[in-house]
Amino acid sequence: MSKSMRKYINTLDEGQWEPVFKSEGSESTMSSHRTTHEISDYKEPFTLIIQRTPKSGQQQLDLNQEGDEIQTNGYTYRVIATSIDRMSDSEIINWYGARAEKSENKIKELMLDFGGAHMPCGQFQANALYFSICTLSYNLFVMLRNHLPDEFRKSRSKAVRLRIYSMAAKLIKHSRSYKLKLQEFNRDLLSQIIYKIKRYQFYPVLE
């Protein structure tokens, strides 16, 4: 976010912000402000939607911080640049959020969490095979995540590894049988996961 935009945000008063409504019509905790911005190489100015979201317990921070968002006065601010004028602020924010969730965030997961950002060599076919393996790994993870409890529905692979794969437990032998000893809340979580996996139905592939 540019320094001029940070400075502009700092000049806005409370009456210049409008409530943002969710796609189903209910009012969200966000608010927005619409303005225009000009770049010397562009013939016409384009629309900027400034979005702010309250941060509970947030301290006032310096507007000179780096990054694509800023935090100050208890809010996180983001800016959407768009050429769409026929939609309201709420419609643009909801459309942008849905787009990010359905495509851009998934690509980000594939790139950062499953090694898809860097190819191993300079051979096209080898890189294509490598990227196919990355994609297959991501799809298998998504299939697993869809059968985890709802708290993991939007979790990244790192969070799932730390919460499930790195779960502390102890294998003990008792009366000629082995038992896995773990904390009660971890036992309940594993019980939910096993229950959901057992309910999964595998369908035959149609040729």
Image (tube, rainbow, N blue to C red):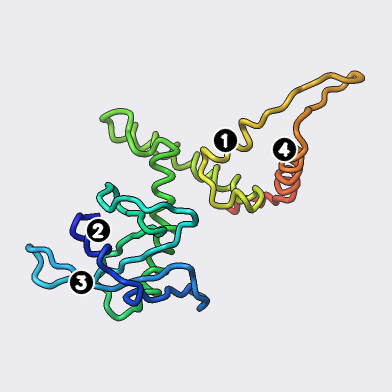
Q: Quadrant of the N terminus?
A: bottom left
- Amino acid on which disc 4 is placed: Asn
- Amino acid on which disc 2 is placed: Arg
| 32 vs 57, nearest the viewer | 57
Cα–Cα span, label 2 and label 4:
45 Å
In the image, taking residue 56 as reference, residue 176 lies left or right, namely: right
- Residue located 34% across and 51% down the image: 61
Q: Is residue 186 above or below residue 47?
A: above
Cα–Cα span, label 1 and label 2:
38 Å
Cα–Cα span, label 3 and label 2:
14 Å
Q: Tell me the residue that label 4 is attached to.
A: 186
- Residue located 84% across and 19% down the image: 173
Q: Which mark is residue 161?
A: 1
Tally of numbered tags: 4
In the image, taking residue 204 as reference, residue 199 lies left or right, namely: right
Q: Tell me the residue that label 2 is attached to.
A: 6
In the image, taking residue 67 as reference, residue 207 lies left or right, namely: right
- Amino acid on which disc 3 is placed: Thr
Cα–Cα span, label 3 and label 4:
52 Å
Q: Earlier in the sequence, mark 3 or mark 2?
A: 2
